[in-house]
Image (spheres, rainbow, N blue to C red):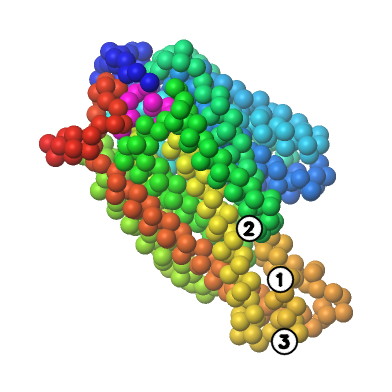
């Protein structure tokens, strides 16, 4: 793609955005953060309501697709939205994404059958795919590189709030006014965000819409990511050697290779190989992938531990990880301020990756008798490490690419985070379940559970998904026990529950070991990031990712 002169700028802002007043900029920022909040909230709020939804719509055989289809459409659409926003402007693409998300939410609320809910959730996810990456690109348009760190840090705050509020709000709405409102709550807030963006966000197009869209690349990427994500989703109920799991993952991996070949030949690639030729960009993608790998594992498996070992409800388990999310909020804001003040980011990111690795290593020591005060400190340390990774890498990537690639670059970051989280949950879920099964015989023996009962439980008759909930581990075991043996099991029920708790702790600890390794790989990826001084967008647009390493180092030294 040929470079073209950058538009005139005022205070580092592209022409078309120069006239945006500080008040309008604040309103736009609040609206896009609201959109981000809704897209993240939707992933946590629906999980709490899903059992009630399945009971009402009688679709237990396809209930996993309510989550899978949303993940599928929202992830696959991310790079497409980024590229389209570069070609045709942020405003129409962001407005289209919000409109589709709101439409999908409203349709989901009025679903009468399970297949309808699955279809409408797919539409909802299709809109959600635009909300985060385009919002990040809009911030890149509205703020110069030197001013971008503070607003980008709000992403960590919004993410943490959505994770905490989602389960509790989902439970409250489901029990008080019905599960339909889990979806309807998106409609007024989405409409508000749409109205503000419609009125205040100016139109601006950095790229060349006439070049066209890479339809061949889009088809290959869609097929590859669909196979990968469905395979990873099927891992929850299958083995890696199953064709529906490992087979689809392999198809996705091969498709990714084909996609890379197609993109090298495309005149207008969706994910430009030129961007990945820049060590700063590619290192940021690697780091974001693996830090999401570890983070999503902590967000999912710590609540599982609290439900089974501490006996709290799913909604309460979300509150139990508040120290982790508080650490994310504090460090994301602090990192944004440090980067904004100093204009440098590499040291912040390196410290962040090291601290997150240490935090995950600490969490790997988890046991059923770990004091709450100790676990709180461990979660806080891990959260402090994770926070900058969700805010600063966006600044890094947007500072390293020309302005006409800002949308594609921002979308690439969101895409790699989403894929990293999906792969991480599948891999870490396997580690938890397999280690749990392996640890059960020894734990049952150490808790003096009679051999005949221990043998029955050790043959895989403890289903983690069946014993989660509000302290119902013992009750779930009794319900699965034949009537003839129930009296005997009741005598040692406390020991069985303790053994399960310790075996699960070992399993979750093993997952955190893998998460720590992933954070270490993220640290290695961060080492390749060049500490390029933050520049105005007018200077960014005049440079390309092929800028030599020597020039970058020379500018950094000066």
Residue 450 disc label? 3
Give the class, few, some or many, for how many residues have Cα within 10 Å of label 3's Cα (few <14, many ≥20).
Answer: some
User: Which quarter of the image is occupied by the N terminus?
Assistant: top left
Tag 2 residue:
240
* Location of residue 531 in the rendering, given as x and y in whole percent from the top left corner: 24, 41
Q: Quadrant of the C terminus?
A: top left
Which callout, 1 or 2, points to the residue nearer the camera? 2
Q: Say which element carries label 3.
A: loop
Q: Residues within 10 Å of mark 2 (few under 14, many from 20)?
A: some
All told, the count of numbered labels is: 3
Q: Tell me whether the residue at label 2 lies in contact with that at label 3, contact meaning CB atoms closer than 8 angstroms.
A: no
User: Could you tell me which residue is drawn at 56 percent across and 26 percent down?
Assistant: 216
Q: Quadrant of residue 279?
A: top left
Residue placed under numbered mark 1 in the picture: 460
> Does the stretch in magenta take in 270?
no
Q: Residue 136 or 429: which is nearer the viewer?
A: 429
Position in image of residue 308 (x %, y %): 62, 65
Element type at marker 1? helix
Q: CA distance from mark 2 to mark 3?
A: 33 Å
- 359 left or right, relative to 230: left
Q: Magenta region: which residues?
A: 400-410
Kindly report which numbered mark, 2 or 3, lies closer to the viewer in this rendering: 2
Query: What element does badge 2 sit on?
Result: loop
Q: Which is nearer the N-term, disc 1 or disc 2?
A: 2
Say if 258 sits above or below 265 in the image. below
- CA gap between label 3 and label 1 equals 17 Å
Q: Earlier in the sequence, mark 3 or mark 1?
A: 3
Q: Position of residue 296 (x, y in %)?
A: 51, 51
Q: Which residue is rendered at x = 80% and y = 44% of the image?
A: 59
Q: Looking at the image, is mark 3 or mark 1 nearer the viewer?
A: 1
């Amino acid at each position: 793609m040929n470079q073209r002169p950058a538009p005139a700028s005022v205070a580092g802002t592209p022409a078309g955005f120069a006239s945006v007043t500080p008040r309008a900029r604040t309103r736009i920022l609040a609206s896009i953060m609201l959109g981000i909040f809704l897209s993240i909230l939707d992933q946590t709020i629906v999980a709490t309501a899903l059992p009630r939804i399945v009971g009402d719509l009688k679709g237990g055989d396809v209930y996993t697709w309510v989550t899978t289809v949303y993940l599928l459409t929202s992830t696959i659409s991310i790079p497409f939205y980024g590229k389209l926003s570069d070609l045709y402007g942020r405003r129409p693409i962001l407005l289209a994404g919000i409109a589709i998300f709101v439409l999908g939410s409203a349709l989901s609320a009025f679903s009468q059958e399970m297949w309808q809910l699955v279809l409408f959730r797919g539409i909802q996810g299709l809109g959600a795919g635009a909300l985060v990456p385009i919002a990040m690109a809009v911030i890149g348009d509205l703020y110069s590189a030197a001013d971008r760190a503070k607003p980008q840090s709000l992403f960590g705050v919004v993410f943490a709030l959505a994770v905490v509020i989602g389960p509790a709000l989902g439970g409250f709405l489901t029990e008080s006014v019905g599960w339909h409102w889990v979806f309807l709550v998106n409609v007024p807030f989405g409409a508000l965000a749409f109205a503000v963006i419609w009125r205040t966000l100016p139109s601006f197009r950095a790229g060349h819409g006439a070049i066209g869209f890479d339809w061949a690349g889009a088809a290959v990427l869609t097929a590859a990511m669909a196979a990968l994500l469905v395979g990873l989703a099927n891992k929850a109920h299958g083995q890696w050697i199953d064709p529906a799991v490992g087979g689809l993952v392999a198809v996705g991996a091969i498709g990714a290779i084909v996609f890379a070949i197609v993109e090298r030949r495309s005149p207008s690639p969706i994910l430009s190989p030129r961007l990945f030729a820049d060590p700063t960009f590619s290192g940021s993608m690697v780091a974001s992938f693996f830090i999401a790998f570890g983070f999503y594992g902590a967000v999912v498996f710590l609540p599982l531990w609290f439900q089974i070992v501490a006996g709290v409800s799913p909604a309460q388990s979300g509150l139990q990880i508040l120290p982790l999310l508080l650490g994310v909020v504090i460090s994301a804001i602090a990192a944004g301020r440090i980067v904004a003040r100093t204009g440098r980011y590499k040291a912040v990111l390196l410290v962040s990756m090291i601290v997150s690795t240490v935090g995950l290593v600490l969490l790997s020591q988890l046991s059923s008798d770990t004091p709450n005060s100790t676990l709180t400190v461990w979660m806080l340390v891990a959260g402090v490490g994770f926070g900058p990774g969700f805010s600063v890498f966006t600044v890094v990537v947007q500072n390293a690419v020309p302005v006409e690639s800002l949308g594609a670059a921002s979308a690439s970051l969101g895409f790699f985070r989403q894929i990293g989280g999906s792969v991480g949950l599948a891999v870490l879920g396997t580690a938890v379940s397999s280690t749990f099964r392996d640890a059960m015989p020894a734990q049952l023996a150490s808790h003096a559970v009679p051999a005949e009962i221990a043998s029955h439980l050790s043959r895989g008759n403890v289903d983690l998904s069946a014993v989660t909930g509000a302290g119902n581990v013992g009750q779930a075991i009794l319900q699965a026990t034949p009537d003839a043996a129930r009296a005997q099991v009741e005598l040692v029920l406390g020991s069985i529950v303790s053994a399960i708790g310790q075996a699960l702790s070992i399993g979750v600890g093993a997952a955190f070991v893998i998460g720590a390794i992933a954070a270490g790989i993220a640290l290695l990826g961060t080492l390749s990031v060049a500490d390029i001084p933050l520049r105005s967008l007018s200077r960014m647009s005049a440079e390309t990712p092929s800028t030599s390493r020597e020039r970058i180092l020379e500018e950094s030294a000066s």
